[in-house]
Amino acid sequence: MVQGKTKGLQNKASSSRQAAKAAANPKKGKRYIPPKKTALVKQATMRQSLTAKINKSIEQQMVSAASAGKLTIMKNTIDAEPPKVTPSGKASKS
């Protein structure tokens, strides 16, 4: 018997397990069906280009803000002092 002749020629048994797993867990999110009418196709391409332009503008604004100085999520986190606790147990700002 010649060795290596049947390598890769054997068919794997089709697994229904993976198909059942895929059917049990459908993908999350809204389903998108591309438009077929010419007016809707044109509208979809315009919406796509506008979305891309808006995202690019936002990214450029973020880059300019980041290059101008440090970005902080909370205002005055470094400058603020912790609130002082009075004997009554309430915090005061002064």
Image (tube, rainbow, N blue to C red):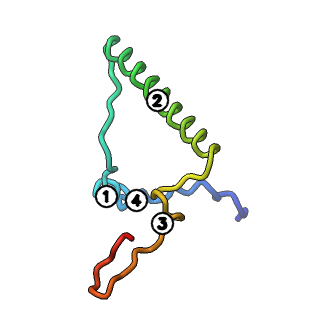
Identity of the amino acid at label 4? Ser
Label 3, residues with CA under 10 Å away: few <14, some 14-19, many ≥20? few
The image shows residue 33 at horizontal and vertical percentages of 32, 30
Mark before the other along the chain sequence, 1 or 4? 4
Looking at the rendered image, the disc whose residue lies closer to the viewer, 2 or 4, is 2
The residue that disc 4 covers is: 15
The image shows residue 86 at horizontal and vertical percentages of 33, 83
Mark before the other along the chain sequence, 2 or 3? 2
Q: Secondary structure at mark 2?
A: helix
Q: CA distance from mark 1 to mark 4?
A: 9 Å
The residue that disc 1 covers is: 20
Q: Is residue 3 above or below residue 56?
A: below
The residue that disc 2 covers is: 54
Label 1, residues with CA under 10 Å away: few <14, some 14-19, many ≥20? few
Label 2, residues with CA under 10 Å away: few <14, some 14-19, many ≥20? few
Q: Residue at x 43, y 29 (%)?
A: 51
Question: Where does the N terminus fall, quadrant-wise?
Answer: bottom right
Q: Is residue 79 above or below residue 9?
A: below
Looking at the rendered image, the disc whose residue lies closer to the viewer, 1 or 3, is 3
The residue that disc 3 covers is: 80
Query: Which of these two is toward me, 89 or 12?
Result: 89
The image shows residue 22 at horizontal and vertical percentages of 34, 55
Identity of the amino acid at label 2? Ile
Q: Residue at x 63, y 58 (%)?
A: 6
Identity of the amino acid at label 1? Ala
Mark before the other along the chain sequence, 1 or 2? 1
Mark before the other along the chain sequence, 1 or 3? 1
